[in-house]
Image (cartoon, rainbow, N blue to C red):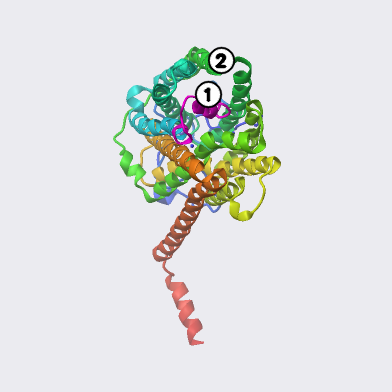
Amino acid sequence: MLSGRRLFLPRCVASTRPLPEEAVPAIAGPPLFPMGSRAADGAGPERPPEDGTPEAPGEESRRLTRQQLFTMLAAASINFSSMICYSILGPFFPGEAEKKGASNTVVGLIFGCFALVNFLTSLIMGNYLTKIGAKFMFVSGMFVSGCVTILFGMLDKVPSGPMFIGLCFLVRAMDAISFAAAMTASFSILAKAFPNNIATVLGSLEIFTGLGLVLGPPLGGFLYQSFGYEIPFITLGCVVLLLVPVNMCLLPKYDSIPTKESFWKLALLPKVLFLCFTIFSLSACLGFLDPTMSLFILKKFKLPAGYVGLVFLGLALSYSLSSPLLGLLSDKMPHLRKWLLVSGGLITALCFFLLGPAPVLHIESQLWMFVLVLVFLGFSLGMSAIPVFPEILQCAYENGFEEGLSLLGLVSGLFNAVWSLGAFIGPTLGGFLNEKLGFEWASAIQGGWAVLSGLATGIFYIAEATRKSSSSSLQNPPSDNEERTHLLGSET
């Protein structure tokens, strides 16, 4: 690659035994299990919880358990701290890097380096999650992230030229490894704690992602203008380090028995491939804005660095406020996920075409229109991003993958890896296009990723629905009575 609502979540997955087929009555109506239950997805009976504690079938909790609450607090802390550290660079780092001899393309590569290393590391972290331990991976990732954030604040003391650029790449790579560890563990732990409401929980936690994106640019711009380059990074790095012992106490320990599920078996499923392309396109579009948007705002609207961060509010606020609603909608009405994915991709493409706007429209760019497009862009990104994780999980269950922390680690690693790949291609290609063609054409071209993903996903879902419909008609041929009635009707 955002509510004071009360969540009604099950305390754990019930331990049940399958009934004989003749003993199960035919019940018309919606599925009895929400998304996340293998019984709902046709993947067989549910397995007991891994801690071995059974619970009466159908028993639900009307409030968050203490373990769930601590898990959400820990995940909220990593969402907020990682996003505020990531977004703080936007308002002033591209200009500071230019003073140190870095071109627009090199600045884009510095942003993209983070994502490339994240991509490679997420695959490894997801595969070895159960061996390393989810809690240890989470806490150690936060610790390293805090340390390298402080180190990044010291780079202004480095001589300009290759030395500065090389150390920027090195520190960003270290930060990417820590971020991959913490986020892969966070996604897995959340899916383990909230198996039936993962989209709702992820959407709710995007509020803290949005807060980090909202506060990062203006806070970074203010601290940079008031105290210089070092203070923004030192301040935030110390905050992240203070959160490490807090999370060591808060976060429950989730143990799991490693399984032999194949990562490539999951990644090469046709539906998962299309969903991965959706993740990639959204991340590439969003990553394009990192090295380019602040420079465009400074040159086009003549705003000081301290005010550039306020423009980012349109995107971050709309994403954070819409994500809980979209997550709830995705969990309550799973059949709408496909429409959210397709329409979200197409709206994202339209927003990028209007962001410049594209020169073929012959529309003069104005600040109010730029912010309005960012608002719609934040909403459309949420439409496509929130349903992807539960869709991949559902696809895995339908194809016989075994429930547990091992599968969740694979899905989390795959999600973060593909998101990171897009976050590498986006700023790298975006920085090059911005340098050669200008922001207006570059943003319009970048929206092509979203067009392709929206159309490809839509075509896949149509083909899947057609295949299921024809398969259903073949498996349920007309009965003898229906054939007799049809023949009698023909004779008359």
Nearest the eye: 207 or 163 = 163
Q: Whole-percent x and y of residue 347?
A: 58, 50
- Residue that carries the numbered disc 2 in the rendered image: 231
**Mark 2 burial class by Cα count in 10 Å: few <14, some 14-19, many 20+:** some
128 to the left or right of 376: left
- Dot 2 falls on a residue whose secondary structure is helix
Residue 157 in sight: yes
**Mark 1 burial class by Cα count in 10 Å: few <14, some 14-19, many 20+:** many
Q: Is residue 29 above or below residue 316?
A: below
Magenta span: helix, strand or loop, mainly? helix
Whole-number angstrom distance, CA of label 1 to CA of label 2: 12 Å
Nearest the eye: 259 or 210 = 210
Magenta span contains residue 99: yes
Nearest the eye: 80 or 488 = 80
Report the residue that reaches farthest toward the bottom.
492
Q: Whole-percent x and y of residue 333?
A: 57, 46
- Dot 1 falls on a residue whose secondary structure is helix
The part of the chain drawn in magenta is 80-107
Residue 388 in sight: no
Label count reads 2
Identify residue type, mark 2.
Answer: Ile
Identify residue type, mark 1.
Answer: Cys
- Residue that carries the numbered disc 1 in the rendered image: 85
Q: Residue at x 58, y 33 (%)?
A: 294
Between discs 1 and 2, the one toward the N terminus: 1
Report the residue that reaches farthest toward the right.
368
Q: Whole-percent x and y of residue 221?
A: 61, 24
